[in-house]
Amino acid sequence: MNHQLVLGLGGCVDFELDWDADVLADLAREHHIGLADLDIAVPIQDERSLVCSLLGFLAADQGGERFVGSSEVAIAFAERFRYKVSLGGTCVRAAMAIAKLGVPSLVHLVSIDDNVRRLLPSNVSYLCSAEADTLDPHVIVQFPAGASVALVDGEVRATHPNRIIFVNDPPNRDLVLSDDLPEALVDARAFLPAGFNVMSDAGLLRQRITFLNAAMRKLPDEAVVFYEDSGFHQQELRDIVSREFSGRIDVHSLNEDELQAYLGRRIDLLDVAQVKQALADFFHGFSIAPTVVVHTKYWALAFGKQPRRYCDALAAAIDLAGVRYWRGDDFTVDDLAAVAALPVRPDGQRFAVQVSAELAEAVCCVPTRLIETDTPTTIGLGDTFVGGFLAALID
């Protein structure tokens, strides 16, 4: 079961909720939620705290991922809305996106059920470490630009579209790795390890890292290991990954929210001086690879060692993420061609020119496309970006 692309480390089932401001306003009234109650970081143990967290993200105009005390709380909240069942996890969404382009891959799963068997494309193979079927859905709320929700004492409003993920997923939290994974890497040209962010036990995390560091010795010398960062539920576990998961990582990739979380400050993504300092601070303080990739709504860039090696991959990744933003799961190859023909964002283009002048050979920056839609998809854009990047590496 050898493939050129091996994508891990865990997939999941997603409940993608339809945005409904009226339902959220009703919940705010029911739970007597006002502006002072909104808190992105509140521990989520019941429906009220979940709504306080969600509306806190809306008020902050940002996306993120939060742990929920139980899957039952997340499922009960989802039942308040209309929702779509889909497959998620960085590795699975990346695999499903490139499957539409005819690019096969092997994914490593830690859980499975009939939803997975039904929805996984035929050209996506899988290894699975699970011994039985389970369902612990990731509940995803995406809000459009201009979304507003009435509270008992005011209103919150978002400027940009984004998404929030609520999750309690024991299989991904334990992240048991298949004994077959090392041999699956023997012929790989690219390997994606992602998914450490939902783990909760430091000892288990260290075991998984030790296993994975050894497994990656099976990779061919020319293979690219692309580590996709994510919103860690526990800061101390992120620090363990930074210290111990090293030695064979070629690219450390993350989005704008994750970059800002590492640095503990907001960044104007169109201010070259701020971004330049952020890249330097992250590269020297947190990166576990010689090349850093940052993907944002305005641009994507590679920074560090030999970044121009990845220029084509950045461009392919931007277009694949762009077509998902425009068309969602149901995009076609023709849709992708249409996106590739669109002009780039003028603000992103100006930034790309300026940052390239500042950092010269240390950076490759590609602006995103100018895509206009009243129904954007914000779920899985980073995952799709990863798929496009890795598919381009083996093209």
Image (tube, rainbow, N blue to C red):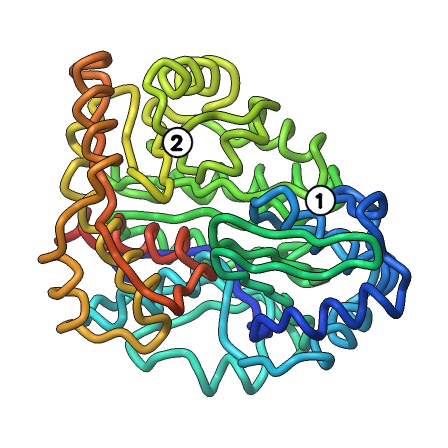
Residue 178 seen by the camera: no
- In the displayed structure image, the side of residue 273 where residue 245 appears, left or right: right
Quarter location, residue 27: bottom right
Query: Circle 1 is placed at which residue position?
Result: 204
Crowd rating for badge 1 (residues with CA inside 10 Å; few <14, some 14–19, many 20+):
some
Q: Quadrant of the N terminus?
A: bottom left
- Secondary structure of the residue carrying tag 2 is loop
Q: How many marks can you see?
A: 2
Q: Position of residue 196 (x, y in %)?
A: 59, 45
Q: Quadrant of the C terminus?
A: bottom left
Q: Residue furthest front?
A: 154
- Secondary structure of the residue carrying tag 1 is helix
Quarter location, residue 205: top right
Q: Earlier in the sequence, mark 2 or mark 1?
A: 1
Q: Amino acid at mark 1?
A: Leu
Q: Position of residue 163 (x, y in %)?
A: 54, 56
Residue 265 vs 224, above or below: the answer is: above
Query: Circle 2 is placed at which residue position?
Result: 248
- In the displayed structure image, the side of residue 140 where residue 351 appears, left or right: left
Residue 386 vs 46, above or below: the answer is: above
Q: Amino acid at mark 2?
A: Arg
**Residue ID at (27%, 65%):** 98
- In the displayed structure image, the side of residue 143 where residue 136 appears, left or right: right
- In the displayed structure image, the side of residue 219 where residue 205 appears, left or right: right
Residue 367 vs 355, above or below: the answer is: below
